[in-house]
Amino acid sequence: MPGPSDIWTADFAAETTKALEAGIKARVADDRVRLSLAGFVTDYRNFQNTVFLGNSVVLSVPRVDVHGIEASAQADVGQGFRVDGGMAWTRSRVGRYTTPNPTPEPGEPAILDLKGKRTPNAPDWTLNGGLDWSGAAGAAIIDARLSVAYVSRVDFEIDNILHSPGYTSVDGRVGVTLGSWTLDLWAKNLFDKRWAISAFGQQQLPLLLGLGPDGPFDSFTINTGRQFGLGASRRF
């Protein structure tokens, strides 16, 4: 890692990967139910970890190990209803990486061993599900959907200090079509949940700015919260 007086150059080792993926897809119940399942393993060498050190720079992590499972299902359940869902479990961990401690506190080691740490922006779990309904109401056609999504803890730096806890969000949409006109009413993050979408911390900035642990402070960017929208379109 660079020190406070070092000149940073954009030279870093090429990232290479070895990956294996296998899966299966199926249709059952007269094609009313569709299923898929896949597993994967990926080994990274010289994983390119982008961090904010006054500017965005790339630091090479010698080894990162990733493996996981993904599954999804969709089903037509009758009376205009459809359900769908998905699940992904991903274990993305540092396999080998030691680095100088940028802001050592009393009793802390001068060299940090980050083996086993989560990689940035790689949650272990993501889950989603939805319910759709479409049908006629007099002369109008109604198309509605309610969906929910869960994301587990997200780390923003490879030392896993700054992170966002797991969160759940709910979205909804109702569309009404009458003749050539369609009116859409939608809502995102219906229950106004807040979570961090990015962050950087004082642990990194002293590397280039020469500042101690008293500053600057950690910085988080929070999502925009609940959103509503109304749209209209006409088909010619």
Image (cartoon, rainbow, N blue to C red):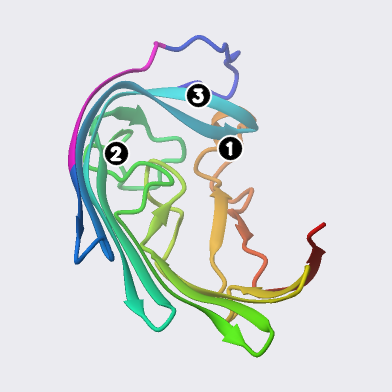
Residue holding disc 2: 109
Q: Are marks 2 and 1 in contact (CB under 8 Å)?
A: no
- Side (left or right) of 101 relative to 57: left
Residue depicted at 58% across the width and 53% down the height: 218
- In the rendered image, residue 54 lying in the magenta stretch gets the answer no
Determine whether label 3 and label 2 are within 8 Å by CB.
Answer: no
Q: Is residue 9 left or right of residue 158?
A: right
Asked whether residue 21 is drawn in magenta, I would say yes
- Rendered view: 139 above or below 203: below
- Amino acid type, mark 1: Leu
Badge number at residue 205 = 1
The residue that disc 3 covers is 58
- Image side of residue 171 versus residue 149, left or right: right
* Magenta stretch bounds: 13-23
Is 1 located above or below residue 134 in the figure? above
Count the labels in the image.
3
Q: CA distance from mark 3 to mark 2?
A: 24 Å
Q: CA distance from mark 2 to mark 1?
A: 19 Å
Q: Which residue shows up at 57% across the image and 72% down it? A: 194
In front: label 3 or label 2: 3
Count residues near mark 3 (Cα–Cα under 10 Å), then give few for <14, some for 14-19, many for 20+. Answer: some
